[in-house]
Image (spheres, rainbow, N blue to C red):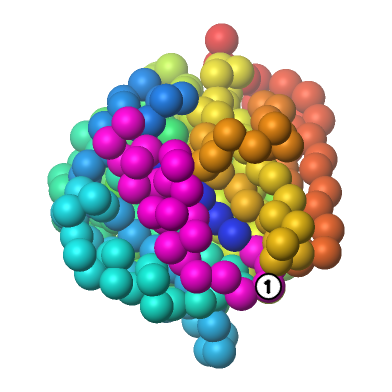
Amino acid sequence: MCRWAAYIGSPIYIVDLVSAPKHSLIVQAREAEECKTSINADGFGIAWYAHRREPGLYRDVFPAWSDPNLKSVSEQVKSRLFLAHVRASTGTAISRNNCHPFAYDRWSFMHNGQISGFEQMRKHFDMAIPDQLYLSRKGATDSEALFLIALGQGLERDPHYALLRTAQIVEELAVAQNIPARLRMTLAFSDGETLYALRYASNGNAPSLYFRRRALDDGWIVVSEPLQDEPDWQCVEENSFCTFTQDSMSRQAFMNGANDLGFARAS
């Protein structure tokens, strides 16, 4: 599994999350504590928002701790909203196009988790991506497929509903192929104005997710696991859809029940 961190608030240097904390994202790339795979060395990436509508994007295939450019960029770039990710591949190749975050127009997206049986269903997932978005399918991961399917399901209009529809499509495809549905996702995504986070698993075993208020910068930090030993980290419950702005945070149930969209959860 992967590790990630996201921030929204008054501008801060990216280094404040990526490498400065005691248990920074770079430390988690080598020594993750709340992850099945403690090493996350299959690439990294950052998406950040500044003066333009679209996010800046820097990704590479090296372990995050070994790339001097990452250190330099994170020390120089100041951003009001950014997403950072270190990758542990669940089967797809180590390539720049498979590194998170992914970006399309003003949207950025990163994911920790997996779709079981994805390799057997990859063709069907690709077919669920609308034609107008398929040219943006640069890599081969289940994560990028989730992002593009969600865009096609109305992410721009209603992010919560778009992710619900995407989850439904995943499980419907699994049922159609007679493959046990196992969708696990802790993800963050943004349109450059609002930061969204989701923790959900069809089998009730979603990867970890935390957040805390960074009062110094009037901002929010959202992470796979805490960056420091502060006592005010809050663990996000499973089946939660979270919305962050600089001034507010709200949580709601992702699915209201097992049959929220007319399909049953996998056991």
Q: Answer above or below: position of 84 versus 210.
A: below
Front-most of 237 and 146? 237
Q: Which residues are magenta?
A: 8-31
Q: Is residue 17 magenta?
A: yes
Q: Answer above or below: position of 125 versus 131.
A: above
Q: Quadrant of the C terminus?
A: top right
Residue count near mark 1 (Cα–Cα under 10 Å), binned few <14, some 14–19, many ≥20: some
Corner quadrant of residue 261 = top right
Residue 125's spot in the image, x, y percent? 38, 45
At x 33% / y 73%, what residue is drawn?
Answer: 73
At x 52% / y 35%, what residue is drawn?
Answer: 225
Q: Tell me which amino acid carries mark 1.
A: Ser
Front-most of 256 and 109? 109
| Residue 45 showing in the rendered view | yes
Residue 153's spot in the image, x, y percent? 60, 58
Corner quadrant of residue 132 = bottom left
Q: Is residue 9 left or right of residue 41?
A: right
Q: Secondary structure at mark 1?
A: strand
At x 49% / y 60%, what residue is drawn?
Answer: 16
Residue 35's spot in the image, x, y percent? 41, 25
